[in-house]
Image (cartoon, rainbow, N blue to C red):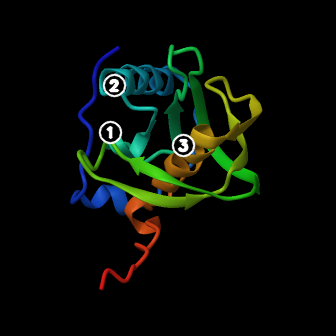
Amino acid sequence: MALRKIVEVGDPILRKKSRPVEKFDERLHTLLDDMRETMYEQNGVGLAAVQVGVLRRVVVMDCSTDKSGYLELINPEIIETEGEQCEQEGCLSLPGKTGITKRPAEVKVKALDRNGNWCVYKGTELKARCFCHEIDHLDGILFTDRLKPAIETDLG
């Protein structure tokens, strides 16, 4: 395993649409292992392959506090959403930047595992936001594109 360099905002690759994974081989496994190590090293809760310069539909994530919730999502698709939440988000590709985004409160995702088997995952709160945030990356969308407009107040 190796740490990968995280691509930061301004690099045009972050705005490109990632291609589906077709080969489930050692190269994919190495990418997944490297992404996991990189995400944990950077104290992230999710990382998309495009963020390490690879235009493939691959995501790793772990929204737990004890590294027990690790997931690998290959060719993920959101198949169901419910409710709404507005919470603070940040991104490893936009260091130091945060903002309030509107996301579904519950999300169900269908994805392949590292061996090409379909799995279905459900998430609420942070996990739901993470699913949406990382899948957005695969389509060239950054959380800053989804920022909730500031509420204007009359201070006079």
Residue 150's image quarter?
bottom left
Q: CA distance from mark 2 to mark 3?
A: 16 Å
> Residue visible at 28% across and 22% down?
3
First in sequence: mark 1 vs mark 2 = 2
Badges 1 and 2: C-beta atoms under 8 Å apart? yes
> Residue visible at 66% across and 56% down?
104
Q: Is residue 6 above or below residue 71?
A: below
Q: Is residue 56 above or below residue 99?
A: above
* Numbered circle sitting on residue 52: 1
Give the x, y percent position of residue 27. 45, 25
Quadrant (top left/top right/bottom left/bottom right) for the N terminus: top left
Residue 22's image quarter?
top right
Quadrant (top left/top right/bottom left/bottom right) for the C terminus: bottom left
- Can I make out residue 24 in this image? no
Residue pointed to by mark 2: 38
Q: Is residue 115 above or below residue 143?
A: above
